[in-house]
């Protein structure tokens, strides 16, 4: 049920990829006053298969596919590492949510911050691509343009954040390296772990470090 609710919250981020592409997407959702839903949820997906899950109630990152248990062969502390990262984002996005509510002159009620990031890898050409985008209350808020390495602010309330993040050259360099190198490297490993399961349905049609608002 939680997964279904989560997918409905992040539906605006989903997009199709071509038959040659593999994708790794991860979603963070921080919310306030959403009935029967954790205040923070993190979900990782490979080729639209959910591979890992964390929420603020369980406080533990866990595999959602049997083949993801192989990940400890490449990093023995993988699940502890993912848990620590999720706890960090849980704390950070709680603060971000409060900041955004103030920027939009909001108080109580249901409010949601969503982040989708990840990468795509063409296993025939070797081409890779990455993306990071933020949404607030169901609308695009700020998006990274990987070609220009600048942030795009669809909403006026995000312009100040865009200016701040555009000036953070170290963070931009980290994101570029992560989205074009580290993320695709992990994606290739995930695809290798689950190749038999992923290919069973035919050829298949997102964790940068924090940046503060």
Image (tube, helix red, strand yellow):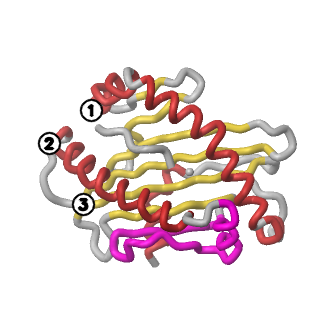
The reply, left or right, for residue 213 in relation to residue 71 is left
Point 56% across, 63% down: residue: 78
Residue 49 lies, in percent from the top left, at 65, 66
CB atoms of marks 2 and 1 within 8 Å: no
| Closest to the observer, 33 or 194 | 194
Point 44% across, 65% down: residue: 83
From what the image shows, is residue 97 above or below residue 151? below
- Give the mark nearest the N terminus, 3 or 1: 3
Point 30% across, 51% down: residue: 92
Q: Which mark is residue 110?
A: 3
Q: Which residue is mark 1?
A: 157
State the CA–CA distance, disc 2 to disc 1.
Answer: 11 Å
Residue 179 lies, in percent from the top left, at 59, 39
Residue 98 lies, in percent from the top left, at 20, 49
Crowding at label 3, few (<14), some or many (≥20) Cα neighbours within 10 Å? few
Crowding at label 1, few (<14), some or many (≥20) Cα neighbours within 10 Å? some
Which region of the structure is painted magenta? Answer: 49-74
Q: Which residue is mark 2?
A: 105
Crowding at label 2, few (<14), some or many (≥20) Cα neighbours within 10 Å? few
| Closest to the observer, 143 or 181 | 181
Report helix, strand or loop for mark 3.
loop
From what the image shows, is residue 104 above or below residue 51? above
């Amino acid at each position: 049920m939680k997964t279904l609710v989560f997918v409905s919250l992040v539906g605006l981020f989903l997009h199709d990829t071509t038959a040659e592409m593999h994708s790794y997407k991860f979603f963070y959702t921080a919310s306030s006053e959403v009935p029967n839903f954790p205040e923070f949820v993190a979900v990782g997906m490979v080729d639209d298969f959910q591979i890992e899950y964390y929420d603020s109630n369980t406080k533990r990152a866990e595999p959602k596919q049997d083949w993801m248990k192989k990940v400890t062969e490449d990093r023995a502390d993988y699940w502890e590492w993912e848990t620590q990262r999720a706890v960090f984002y849980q704390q950070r996005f709680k603060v971000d949510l409060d900041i955004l509510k103030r920027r939009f002159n909001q108080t109580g009620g249901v409010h949601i911050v969503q982040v989708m990031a990840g990468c795509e890898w063409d296993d025939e050409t070797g081409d890779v691509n990455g993306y990071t985008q933020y949404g607030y209350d169901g609308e695009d808020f700020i998006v990274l343009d990987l070609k220009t390495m600048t942030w795009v602010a669809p909403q006026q309330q995000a312009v100040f954040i865009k200016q701040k993040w555009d000036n953070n050259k170290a963070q931009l360099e980290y994101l570029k390296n992560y989205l074009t190198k580290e993320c695709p490297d992990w994606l290739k490993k995930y695809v290798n772990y689950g190749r038999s399961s992923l290919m069973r349905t035919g050829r298949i049609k997102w964790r940068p470090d924090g940046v503060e608002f």
